[in-house]
Image (cartoon, rainbow, N blue to C red):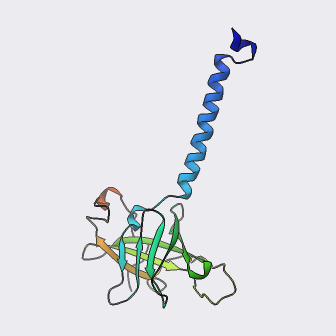
Amino acid sequence: GINAEYGETPQKKMQTLLFLFSLLSLILSGSQATSRIDPYLLDDWTIPNSPLTITFWENGTFSANLWDLPRFEADYTVDQTHNPYWIDLEMPFDILVPGIYGYGTSFDGLKELHLVLGEFNPFSGSKKKDRPTSITSHNGFVFYGSPVSQTTTGTTTNSICPPPPVCPPPP
């Protein structure tokens, strides 16, 4: 009929639909990979006897009291394709601080976040910071979150299956 005159056969329609579906799938999977959130991070993290705190939210933002800075809120991204995992924190003064992290469980059943950040100096002329490469008992922070059996969203972390801690035991 009329469609055949314009070169639109059922096979061409199917190929076009498959191509568009594949293209859409590729675009969506790419955007999901860059905006992935680690559910284990979604918590209020503290260090006992310290003013240092950090809270991560599902929308890719965090709020923190770090170093001598007043509490601030900014964006973060994670990349779990690396070991240890990568995290980038946007800091005041438009500085992006790369870091690495891992997690585990404390002896009393609390979630642990082992966080190592690149050097942060707001007065440095360079906005590029080097990413740390390893987590040791001497080069980072150990934050404590909620009990392992619960999270801020009310689900259990048992279903998330966090990886084993990437930090060596203390000496």
Q: Is residue 52 left or right of residue 81?
A: left
Q: Position of residue 89 (x, y in %)?
A: 53, 74
Q: Is residue 130 left or right of residue 165?
A: right
Residue at point 48%, 91% (across, down): 68
Judge by depth and name the residue closer to the eye, 51 or 142. 51
Q: Is residue 5 left or right of residue 26?
A: right
Residue at point 65%, 26% (across, down): 15
Q: Quadrant of the C terminus?
A: bottom left
Q: Is residue 54 above or below residue 82?
A: below
Q: Position of residue 85 (x, y in %)?
A: 50, 67
As drawn, which residue projects farthest toward the top? 1
Q: Is residue 2 above or below residue 42?
A: above
Q: Is residue 149 above or below residue 141?
A: above
Residue 86 can be seen, yes or no: no
Residue 63 can be seen, yes or no: yes
Residue at point 63%, 39% (across, down): 23
Q: Position of residue 117 (x, y in %)?
A: 53, 79
Residue at point 40%, 63% (across, down): 163
Picture mark count: 0
Q: Is residue 156 above or below residue 108?
A: above
As drawn, which residue projects farthest toward the front? 2
Q: Position of residue 9 (x, y in %)?
A: 68, 16
Judge by depth and name the residue closer to the eye, 118 or 165. 118
Q: Quadrant of the N terminus?
A: top right
Judge by depth and name the residue closer to the eye, 123 or 102. 123
